[in-house]
C-alpha cells in the first residue's frame, strides 16, 4: 500500500513519522513542491511559492517560512529584506503529497507590490481586472 493511501485510510489522530512522509513527497523535476500561504486567522490566501526539501526542513525547524526562489536559485526567507515575515502556525500536505498549505501569521503585506496578497488580478468578463491597488 502506498504511503498516501495509508494516510487516506487512517483514522483520526493516526499518522506516520514525519521523515517517512517527507521522503515520500513527489517533488517535481526541479525538486520543488508548490506551497500555498494562507492566513491562519482569516483564511485569506496570500500567495503561492515553491519549496525544496531544504526550505521545508528549515521552515519546520525554525517556524519562520522559507521558500525556494526560482528566479534567484536560492533559499528565500520570507521577510528577510522586506520585514514582512511569515510565522508558521501549521503545515499541511494535500492528499497525494504534491502541494503544501502553510497556515501563517503574516507580518505586513504578503506581496512584493505592497498589496495584502498576491492575488489582485481578477479574471472577470473576458478581462483581467486589478482589484487591489498598491499603497
Image (cartoon, rainbow, N blue to C red):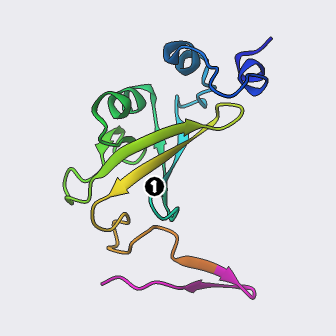
Would residue 77 appear left or right of 14 to someone viewing this image?
left
Query: Magenta includes 9?
Result: no
Magenta residues span: 123-135
Q: Position of residue 1 (x, y in %)?
A: 80, 11
Query: Magenta includes 130?
Result: yes
- Please give the name of the residue rendered at 31% of the width and 44% of the height, measured from the top-left corner: 76
Q: Position of residue 96 (x, y in %)?
A: 71, 31
Would residue 32 appear left or right of 5 to someone viewing this image?
left
- Please give the name of the residue rendered at 49% of the width and 14% of the height, measured from the top-left corner: 19
- Please give the name of the residue rendered at 35% of the width and 54% of the height, measured from the top-left corner: 105
Question: Is residue 113 visible to us here?
Answer: yes
Would residue 98 appear left or right of 74 to someone viewing this image?
right
Would residue 93 appear left or right of 120 to someone viewing this image?
right
Q: Secondary structure at mark 1?
A: loop
- Please give the name of the residue rendered at 71% of the width and 34% of the height, measured from the top-left corner: 95
Q: Quadrant of residue 52?
A: top left
Q: Quadrant of residue 94?
A: top right
Residue for badge 1 = 40
Callout 1 environment at 10 Å: few (<14), some (14 to 19), or many (20+)? some
Q: Position of residue 7 (x, y in %)?
A: 71, 23
Q: Quadrant of the C terminus?
A: bottom left
**95 above or below 22?**
below
Amino acid at each position: 500500500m502506498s504511503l498516501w493511501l495509508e494516510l487516506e485510510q487512517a483514522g483520526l489522530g493516526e499518522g506516520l513519522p514525519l521523515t517517512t512522509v517527507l521522503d515520500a513527497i513527489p517533488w517535481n523535476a526541479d525538486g520543488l513542491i508548490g506551497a500555498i500561504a494562507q492566513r491562519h486567522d482569516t483564511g485569506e490566501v496570500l500567495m503561492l511559492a515553491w519549496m525544496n526539501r531544504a526550505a521545508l526542513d528549515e521552515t519546520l525547524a525554525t517556524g519562520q517560512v522559507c521558500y525556494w526562489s526560482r528566479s534567484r536559485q536560492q533559499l528565500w526567507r520570507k521577510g528577510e529584506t522586506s520585514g514582512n515575515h511569515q510565522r508558521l502556525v501549521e503545515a499541511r500536505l494535500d492528499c497525494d503529497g504534491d502541494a503544501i498549505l502553510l497556515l501563517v501569521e503574516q507580518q505586513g503585506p504578503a506581496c512584493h507590490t505592497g498589496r495584502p496578497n498576491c492575488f489582485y488580478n481578477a479574471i472577470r468578463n473576458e478581462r483581467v481586472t486589478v482589484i487591489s491597488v498598491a499603497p
